[in-house]
Image: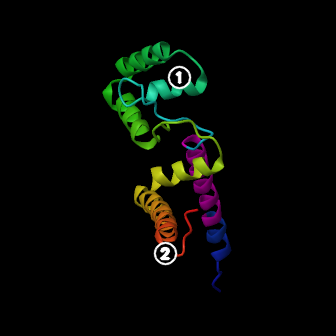
Amino acid sequence: MRRHHGHRRNYKFKQYKRHYNGLRDRLSALTSSQGFYRSRSGIFMGVCQGLADYFNISAFWLRMITLVLFLFTGFWPMGVMYIVAGLLLKMEPVSPLRDEKDQEFYDTYTHSRQSAIQRVKRKFENIERRIQRMEHTVTSREFDWE
């Protein structure tokens, strides 16, 4: 007699999927607007300055802690973690984000620059069409200047 244990495998798959989604959600929350950014005014990649701004502590002391950890753990553990953090974290916005629309634009720009460029291009093409219609109306023979 042969037993089918598909339900057990399916349960494990769901458990792994839930765990993966939880990690992905935590990582995206960490790098989203609620999380922290790499600072534009940082010394090297802006990771320490971004963490210091997020936790509201002195960047000097955070850099000193990072340097001490770098010296005691060796290059590979701390150096690799620092570089990975520098590559994963998004850059701090140039201007403060005012509302959710600005946040959405910034997120799409950082994830897909091509789609953000297309969005800006469409917006300017729309403005150009409106200006052309106004010019056409003003320069037409039916327009009364008086």
Q: Position of residue 16 (x, y in %)?
A: 60, 59
Q: Secondary structure at mark 1?
A: helix
Residue closer to the observer: 132 or 98? 132
Q: Nearer the viewer, mark 2 or mark 1?
A: 2
Q: Residue furthest left?
A: 75
Q: Indicate left or right for 30 with 65 as reference.
A: right
* Mark-to-mark CA distance, 2 and 1: 64 Å
Q: Which mark is residue 6?
A: none
Q: Which residues are magenta?
A: 13-31
Location of the C terminus by quadrant is bottom right
Residue drawn at x 52%, y 36% is 95
Disc 2: CA contacts within 10 A as few (<14), some (14-19) or many (>=20): few
Which residue does the numbered mark 2 point to in the structure image? Answer: 141
Residue closer to the observer: 25 or 105? 105
Task: Give yes or no for contact between labels 2 and 1 (Cβ–Cβ under 8 Å).
Answer: no
Secondary structure that dominates the magenta span: helix
User: Which quadrant of the structure image shows residue 69?
Assistant: top left
Residue drawn at x 43%, y 37% is 85
Give the mark, 2 or 1, whose residue is nearer the N terminus. Answer: 1
Q: Amino acid at mark 1?
A: Ala
Q: Is-magenta flag for residue 133?
A: no
Q: Indicate left or right for 109 with 4 as reference.
A: left
Residue closer to the observer: 112 or 94? 94
Which residue does the numbered mark 1 point to in the structure image? Answer: 52
Q: Is-magenta flag for residue 25?
A: yes
Above/below status of 107 relative to 139: above
Q: Secondary structure at mark 2?
A: loop
Residue drawn at x 65%, y 86% is 1
Q: Amino acid at mark 2?
A: Arg
